[in-house]
Image (spheres, helix red, strand yellow):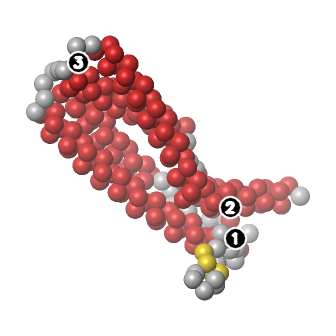
């Protein structure tokens, strides 16, 4: 079975127009369309990270002491994050239409996966660096008015921990909303192919 068979498959996740008419898209077309949308979103994220990093370096140039170090660390982390996303998109394989169906779906499933082990490691490292940067800025700025850096540090750790947890939760929900249905469809199709090969 090759991709010609795949193009005959349609998604059950159909969009209904105002007249209630159902529109079906082939699975291969849906995958290509979705991957293109993800690349556009990644580009916007890269632009946003670069803009924020430039704001950080500008503010850091006007700050002294630990606050300046925090801004610089934040700048470096954001720039590395932008570069990582760019390189990840460059090396990410586009589903090859000439591949057999099972290989095509395996490639698409890998690209649509929520977060791989290396991605998770990088995200946690970046969040740790941003947490340290934010802590230096937070404690330095408020330390000018509050003479208790220990309390400020505890407050920041609690706040940033909740912020990070919420970020992971919101990110997973967004992935489920935008990519979850298609990912499950691909996984289901792969399982059906594996069962067919075994029988």
Quadrant location of the C terminus?
bottom right
Specify few, some or many for label 1: CA neighbours under 10 Å numbering under 14, 14-19, or 20 or more.
some
Residue at left offset 49%, top offset 39%:
166
- Side of 102 relative to 127 (left or right): right
Residue closest to the eye, 34 or 63: 63
Say whether marks 2 and 1 touch (CB < 8 Å). yes
**First along the sequence among labels 2 and 3:** 3
Specify few, some or many for label 3: CA neighbours under 10 Å numbering under 14, 14-19, or 20 or more.
few
Residue at left offset 49%, top offset 35%:
165
Q: Position of residue 17 (x, y in %)?
A: 58, 81
**What count of labels does the image hold?**
3
> Relative to residue 78, is residue 149 depicted above or below?
above
- Side of 107 relative to 75 (left or right): right
**First along the sequence among labels 2 and 1:** 1
Residue closest to the eye, 150 or 182: 150
Residue closest to the eye, 108 or 182: 182
Residue corresponding to mark 1? 12
Residue corresponding to mark 2? 185
Q: Position of residue 104 (x, y in %)?
A: 63, 62
Is residue 125 in sight in this rendering?
Answer: no
Residue corresponding to mark 3? 146
Q: Position of residue 160 (x, y in %)?
A: 40, 30
């Amino acid at each position: 079975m090759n991709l010609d068979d795949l193009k005959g498959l349609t998604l059950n996740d159909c969009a209904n127009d105002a007249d209630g008419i159902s529109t079906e898209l082939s699975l291969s077309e849906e995958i290509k369309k979705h991957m293109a949308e993800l690349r556009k979103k990644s580009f916007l994220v890269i632009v946003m990270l670069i803009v924020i990093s430039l704001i950080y370096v500008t503010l850091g140039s006007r700050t002294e002491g630990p606050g300046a170090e925090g801004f610089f660390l934040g700048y470096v982390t954001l720039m590395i994050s932008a570069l990582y996303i760019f390189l990840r998109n460059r090396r990410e394989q586009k589903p090859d239409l000439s591949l057999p169906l099972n290989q095509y779906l395996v490639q698409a499933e890998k690209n649509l996966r929520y977060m791989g082990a290396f991605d998770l490691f990088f995200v946690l490292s970046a969040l740790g660096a941003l947490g340290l940067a934010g802590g230096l800025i937070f404690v330095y700025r408020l330390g000018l008015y509050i003479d208790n850096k220990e309390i400020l540090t505890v407050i920041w750790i609690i706040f940033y921990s909740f912020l990070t947890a919420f970020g992971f939760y919101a990110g997973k929900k967004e992935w489920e909303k935008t990519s979850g249905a298609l990912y499950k469809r691909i996984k289901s199709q792969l399982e059906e192919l594996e069962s067919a090969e075994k029988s």
